[in-house]
Image (spheres, coloured by chain):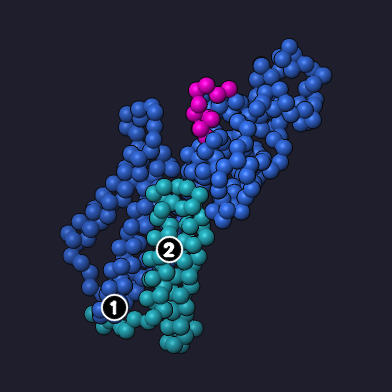
């Protein structure tokens, strides 16, 4: 097998490293933010997953095109067959890994929920400074730091995330195929434990003047919904065109 | 001394083509995550990668059997 001279290999390795670093930097720079990044900011794990995913995808595409041309013109040498293994097995594995690392994390954001037009009224309501719905109050006061929709619509515990992702996948497929009815309705009654995960131990919740002791058991078991007194969580669902 | 180039199997080219399509359908989710790009990545990108991998594995398996190594 012919090996390239050492200086050429060093330059190629440096250019590849530079390309990967630039991809990550560009992905990080594209992230929307309202607060300036701290000095020495090198991006989040999400930025890195996105940047590396894009970098590996472009590398794979370039490699596949180059191998295709070689195969078409002169046939593949033994070294090229090893590169086919790299292009067809190793790089796709990296792309799938980074695709999931970024895609599943980014799917938690308000922007991701708002990317389906059926969610537009709900997301607009979050941004409306005059809105006093429960969701808007949580959003504009930053009671929840990020991933606002996801935080309130996910069960906690070991399988909460898995269940949320599974249901989210169902939403995505139904949205893409148009298999849904308007106005949208929540699939199950909203459980109190999602509220109590944050509020359960707070002084406001435990204050008997606000939540009398005799009502506490019903609130904890969910017999009385938090939303009976603290709703509505969102604006009334509207009929929108598909 | 390197071995001379051999005629490329159609399956290898098919494997390269499905991988390229897999990359093209996976890239959008990394550029902008939406319901459509995520569905494209999960339900089209991954099966295409899997098909590319399967074609390539078949070629390797066939070569090994032809050389009586398996």
Q: Which tint was used for chain B? A: cyan
On screen, residue A190 versus residue B4, left or right, reads right
Q: Does the residue at mark 2 contact the one at mark 1 (Cβ under 8 Å)?
A: no
**Residue drawn at x 66%, y 26% as measured from the top left:** A231
Q: Position of residue A220 (x, y in %)?
A: 76, 28
- Residue pushed farthest top? A209
- Residue at (48%, 39%) from the top-left corner? A111
Tag 2 subunit: B
Q: From the viewer's perspective, is residue B34 above or below residue A66?
A: above
Q: Residues within 10 Å of mark 2 (few under 14, many from 20)?
A: many
Query: Residue A188 got which mark?
Result: none
Percent of width and height locating residue A215 = 80, 21
User: Position of B1 compared to A194: left or right?
Assistant: left
Image quadrant for the N terminus of chain A? bottom left
The correct choice, above or below, for A85 with respect to B60 in the image is above
Q: Residue A72: which numbered mark, if any?
A: 1
* Vertical relation: A182 (above or below) A218: below
Can residue B51 be seen at all in this image of the molecule? yes
Q: Quadrant of residue A38?
A: top left
At which x and y percent is residue A21? 30, 47
User: Is residue A129 located in the magenta-colored stretch of the structure?
Assistant: yes
Residue range in magenta is A123-132
Q: Is residue A201 visible?
A: no
Q: Secondary structure at mark 1?
A: helix
Q: Which residue is mark 2?
A: B22
Is residue B27 left or right of A146 when viewed as pictured?
left
Quick one: label 1, few (<14), some, or many (20+) residues within 10 Å? few
Q: Colour of chain A?
A: blue
Which residue occupies the extreme right position in the image?
Answer: A214
């Amino acid at each position: 097998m012919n090996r390239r001279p050492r200086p050429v290999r060093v330059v190629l390795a440096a250019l590849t490293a530079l390309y990967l670093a630039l991809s990550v930097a560009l992905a990080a720079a594209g992230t929307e933010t309202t607060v300036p990044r701290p000095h020495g900011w090198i991006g989040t794990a999400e930025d890195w997953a996105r940047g590396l995913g894009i970098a590996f995808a472009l590398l794979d595409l370039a490699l596949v095109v180059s191998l295709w041309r070689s195969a078409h013109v002169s046939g593949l040498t033994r070294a090229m067959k090893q590169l086919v293994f790299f292009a067809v097995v190793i790089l796709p594995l990296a792309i799938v890994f980074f695709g999931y690392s970024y895609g599943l994390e980014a799917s938690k954001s308000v922007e991701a929920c708002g990317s389906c037009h059926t969610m537009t009224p709900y997301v607009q309501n979050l941004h409306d400074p005059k809105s006093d719905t429960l969701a808007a109050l949580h959003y504009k006061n930053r009671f929840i730091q990020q991933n606002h929709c996801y935080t309130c619509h996910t069960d906690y515990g070991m399988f909460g995330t898995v269940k949320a992702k599974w249901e989210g996948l169902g939403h995505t497929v139904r949205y893409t195929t148009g298999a849904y009815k308007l106005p949208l309705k929540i699939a199950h009654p909203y459980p109190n434990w999602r509220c109590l995960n944050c509020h359960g131990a707070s002084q406001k919740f435990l204050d008997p003047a606000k939540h009398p002791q005799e009502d506490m058991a019903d609130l904890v078991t969910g017999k009385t919904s938090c939303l009976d007194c603290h709703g509505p969580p969102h604006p009334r669902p509207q009929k929108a065109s598909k | 001394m390197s071995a001379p180039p051999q005629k490329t199997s159609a399956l290898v080219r098919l494997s390269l083509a499905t991988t390229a399509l897999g990359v093209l359908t996976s890239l959008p989710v990394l550029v902008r995550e939406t319901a459509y790009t995520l569905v494209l990545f999960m339900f089209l990108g991954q099966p295409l990668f899997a098909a590319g991998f399967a074609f390539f594995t078949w070629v390797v398996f066939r070569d090994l059997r032809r050389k009586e190594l398996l």
